[in-house]
Image (cartoon, grey):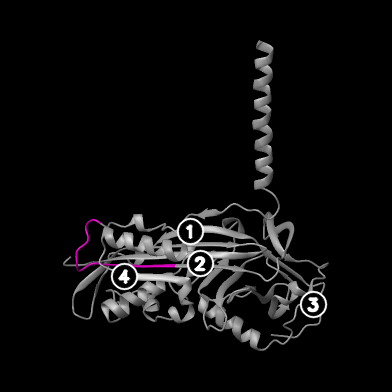
């Protein structure tokens, strides 16, 4: 009887071990990556396209959308701190606005903060996006006055390529090894894959830009070897170089390697908090708390982006033609934009230097 019990325990133990091995293999199969939660000290999030950027910097237009509402609908004038900040001047420009997004891609609202208003937002994003909020619980909803305001926005998009790209062997990115890539290799004979890529310009293996088309109205732009002080300058430079380049078709034997991306970051903005400014009617206000999240996934089949921004505002009274075979390998610092077709500005930007922070 004891021997039988031992055999049963041994059998159960082997089932658990083998099951665990199978699970690990499934999780780490080629092309499958685990979402990276990024700490604030690992990357920078800028508030506007005009802000100065450094390596590993992100931007998404959600904060701009609620700032526009704060400035235009509530304050009814530019937001001015004393002393004034350059980032606030850039926000006041209103460069990015709802003209650059389809209405079905975002939900935004502002009102007097209350638990009822919070529930209204939660129900709205559940109905429109089938999503929950990552930031609403971080705000204080119990001490608001009728003169206070809460501004909120969520952006959510999913896009799919017309045809799935190939999962490529793991490679290097600068000094990082075993980085996961997808794209097109030199053996590709699928013309449909070539046609869903447009070369914007190509100087050499270290200086190029290209875009991917999707089934929706979204396009993904990648650029390598371009160093500008801001995302708006980077995007303008890409546009200028592309306008003078005429070899836009990708040819057989040309290589495209794109790293998988899967990350989530949540950031506050202490630089704009607790500073007094005036509405046009003379009332004094300050931003008690401002939060933004950015979540992005990019794979061989397509991608997803989700971003939230919230702000609690308190009343104080309280190129060249080249015939060589080109290789578009994103294995060093690169910039990325997401933009809707036929729009003049992107709604997301990233400058990626340390790939391990993002996959």
Residue 41 position, x and y percent, is: 47, 56
Return the residue at label 4: 110
Return the residue at label 2: 58
Badge 3 crowding class, 10 Å Cα cut-off, few under 14, some 14 to 19, many 20 or more, is: some
What range is drawn magenta here? 142-154
Badge 4 crowding class, 10 Å Cα cut-off, few under 14, some 14 to 19, many 20 or more, is: many
Question: If you read the primary sequence from the N terminus, does the residue marked by circle 3 or circle 2 appear first?
Answer: 2
- Residue 332: image quadrant is bottom right
Is residue 77 shown above or below 212? below
- Report the Cα–Cα distance between label 1 and label 3: 37 Å
Marks 2,1: beta carbons within 8 A: yes
Judge left or right: residue 190 versus residue 198: right
Q: Nearer the viewer, mark 1 or mark 4?
A: 4
Residue 172 position, x and y percent, is: 70, 58
Judge left or right: residue 62 versus residue 217: left
- Report the Cα–Cα distance between label 3 and label 4: 50 Å
Return the residue at label 3: 251
Q: Nearer the viewer, mark 3 or mark 2?
A: 3
- Report the Cα–Cα distance between label 2 and label 1: 9 Å
Residue drawn at (35%, 55%), measured in percent from left and top?
A: 138
Q: Which residue reaches farthest left? A: 317
- Residue 273: image quadrant is bottom left
């Amino acid at each position: 009887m004891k021997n039988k019990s031992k055999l049963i325990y041994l059998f159960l133990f082997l089932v658990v071990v083998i099951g665990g091995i199978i699970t690990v293999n499934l999780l780490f199969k080629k092309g499958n990556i685990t979402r990276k939660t990024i700490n604030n000290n690992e990357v920078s999030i800028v508030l506007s396209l005009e802000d100065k950027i450094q390596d590993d910097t992100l931007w998404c237009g959600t904060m701009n959308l609620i700032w526009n509402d704060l400035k235009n609908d509530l304050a009814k004038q530019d937001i001015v701190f004393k002393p004034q900040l350059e980032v606030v001047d850039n926000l006041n420009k209103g460069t990015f606005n709802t003209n650059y997004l389809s209405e079905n891609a975002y939900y935004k609202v502002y009102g007097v903060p209350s638990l009822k208003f919070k529930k209204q937002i939660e129900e709205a994003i559940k109905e429109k996006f089938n999503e929950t909020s990552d930031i609403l619980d971080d705000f204080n909803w119990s001490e608001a006055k009728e003169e206070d305001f809460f501004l909120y926005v969520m952006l959510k998009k999913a896009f799919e390529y017309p045809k799935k790209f190939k999962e490529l062997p793991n490679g290097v990115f600068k000094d990082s090894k075993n980085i996961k890539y997808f794209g097109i290799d030199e053996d590709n004979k699928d013309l449909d894959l070539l046609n869903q890529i447009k070369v914007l310009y190509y100087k050499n293996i270290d200086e190029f830009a290209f875009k991917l088309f999707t089934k929706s109205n979204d396009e993904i732009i990648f650029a390598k070897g371009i160093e500008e002080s801001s995302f708006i300058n980077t995007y303008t430079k890409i546009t200028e170089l592309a306008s003078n380049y005429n070899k836009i078709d990708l040819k057989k034997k040309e290589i495209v390697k794109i790293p998988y991306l899967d990350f989530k970051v949540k950031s506050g903005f202490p630089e704009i908090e607790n500073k007094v400014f005036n509405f046009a009617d003379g009332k004094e206000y300050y931003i008690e708390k401002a939060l933004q999240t950015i979540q992005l996934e990019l794979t061989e089949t397509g991608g997803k982006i989700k971003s939230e921004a919230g702000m609690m505002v308190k009343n104080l009274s309280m190129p060249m033609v080249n015939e060589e075979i080109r290789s578009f390998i994103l294995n060093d610092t690169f910039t990325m934009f997401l933009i809707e077709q036929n729009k003049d500005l992107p709604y997301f930007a990233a400058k990626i230097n340390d790939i391990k922070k993002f996959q």
